[in-house]
Amino acid sequence: MATSNTRALARLMLAPSVGVLLTWMIVPLAMTLWFSFQNYNMLNPANVNWAGILNYQYFYSDPAFFQSIWNTLVIVIGVLMITVVGGIGIALLIDQPILGQGVVRILVISPFFVMPPVAALVWKNMIMHPGYGVLAAISRWLGLQPVDWFAQYPLFSIIIIVAWQWLPFATLILLTSLQSLDTEQMEAAEMDGAGAVSQFVYLTLPHLARAITVVILIQTIFLLGVYTEILVTTNGGPGYASTNLPFLIYRTALLGYDVGGASSGGIIAVILANIVAFFLMRAVGKNLDK
């Protein structure tokens, strides 16, 4: 009886916070779903009428739709590859006893605290600018022609900027996992004649598997919503070369003033994000059960 009363009291105390959280999530989602079936343009807000699935058909038939989905997947996969591989490498380096280890770790994780618009502006105007950027100066010093990164390689440039921001996060998670590795196992393997590569493949990498899975899960959720870096640097261009799904929704809503079409795109984005999250959660569950 006491246990039953305790559980009831716990649920009662949790009810307000759960109610606020559900309201915070469900109300905007319900409003987006409602507007996705309405013919609602901000240039004519008084004329709102039922559109049915026409908004979804319009958004689906947009020439940038499939390109935006492809670009979204490329950004997610590209950033994950760079951050996971780079995070493992940097974590292995800064895990070694070196002079000023604390300062080095702070410098390594500092890009994660830079706001996305600021990071995008720094990369656009100070690093990748074809006229006076750092990379252009290096190219001239080597006798090469400077590259206009955002015109010639727009999607790759976005991936580099986003990966630079998320690399510290992956490094921090992987470093924390790396520090929990049993040193006695490493010493025993070394005494048995295992080289550095064998130790990494058979001891370090399996130990980091859970941390890598968590990094992939968390980053994927956020990378599906990358938007600011594209707006600040390429504005989705040239053409649709760097337009991903969130930016396409922004363009439909705030540049085309089409709330109905943008809402249908938002619902499609939510469905795709949940599909990706479902498979990732299953992968995480299988990994953690091992």
Image: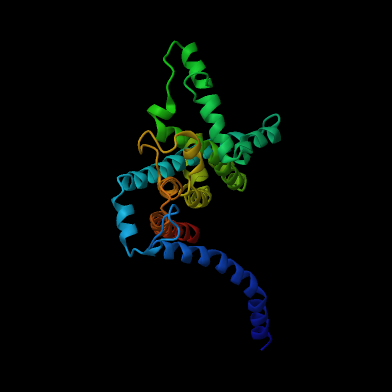
Q: Position of residue 56 (x, y in %)?
A: 33, 58
The spot of residue 74 in percent (x, y) is: 38, 42
Assign the N terminus to one quadrant of the image: bottom right
Q: Is residue 162 left or right of residue 276?
A: right
Q: Which residue is pictured at 70% across the width and 33% down the height?
A: 103
Quarter of the image for residue 155 reads top left
Q: Position of residue 58 (x, y in %)?
A: 31, 54
Residue 226 in sight from this viewpoint: yes
Q: Quadrant of residue 36?
A: bottom left
- Is residue 142 placed above or below 8 in the rendered structure? above
- Vertical placement of residue 178 versus 267, above or below: above
Residue 193 visible in the picture: no
The structure's colour scheme is rainbow
Q: Nearer the viewer, residue 230 or 46?
A: 46
Query: Total marks drawn?
Result: 0
> Where does the image place residue 162, in percent across and percent down from the top left?
50, 39
- In-front residue for pair 247/104: 247
